[in-house]
Amino acid sequence: MRASKLDAYRALTEEVYGVRITSNSTVSALVSQQDSFRAYVDAYLRGAKILTVTPLADGNYETVMELEISNQFYDALNQPRLASNMLLSGGCGIKGAVGPGCTYGAGFYHAE
């Protein structure tokens, strides 16, 4: 039951903040030798409510959660960062920048 709750928190956090994926590929003699991928979720989630925890037939549990998000959250997420914050955060305020500590809002995806 505990694992089901933790997985529900993880899934909800992925929906709100997104997932950071890093990958590495090794190529030798024009042939791919190794591919590796890692997915990261690094965020704080407050105010989430557990609606139901349902036992399933195979000994597993299903947890359903909800989180009410205000418009102020989205406004704060999509605010352009100040130049001093860009230096401290590794340039996350630059359009399309990626790096540790960056939160990707709706404005992250763009075409140039």
Image (cartoon, rainbow, N blue to C red):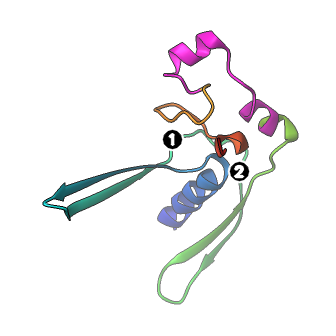
Quarter of the view holding residue 35 = bottom left
**What residue is shown with label 1?**
42
Where does the image place residue 87, in percent across and percent down from the top left? 53, 14
Where does the image place residue 1, in percent across and percent down from the top left? 52, 68
Residue at x 47% of width, y 33% of height = 99
Q: What residue type is labelled 1?
A: Asp
**What residue is shown with label 2?**
48
- Specify whether 54 is left or right of 90: right
Q: Assign a secondary structure to mark 1.
A: loop
Residue 89, compared with residue 74, is above or below; it is: above
- Specify whether 29 is left or right of 79: left
Q: Which residue of the protein is positioned furthest toward the left in this rendering?
A: 29
| Membership of 79 in magenta stretch | yes
User: Mark 2 to mark 1: distance in Å?
Assistant: 16 Å
Where does the image place residue 88, in percent across and percent down from the top left? 52, 15
Residue at x 59% of width, y 74% of height = 62
Magenta range: 74-92
Q: Which of 88 and 57 is in front in this view?
A: 88
Quadrant of image for the C terminus? top right
- Specify whether 18 is left or right of 20: right
Quarter of the view holding residue 5 = bottom right
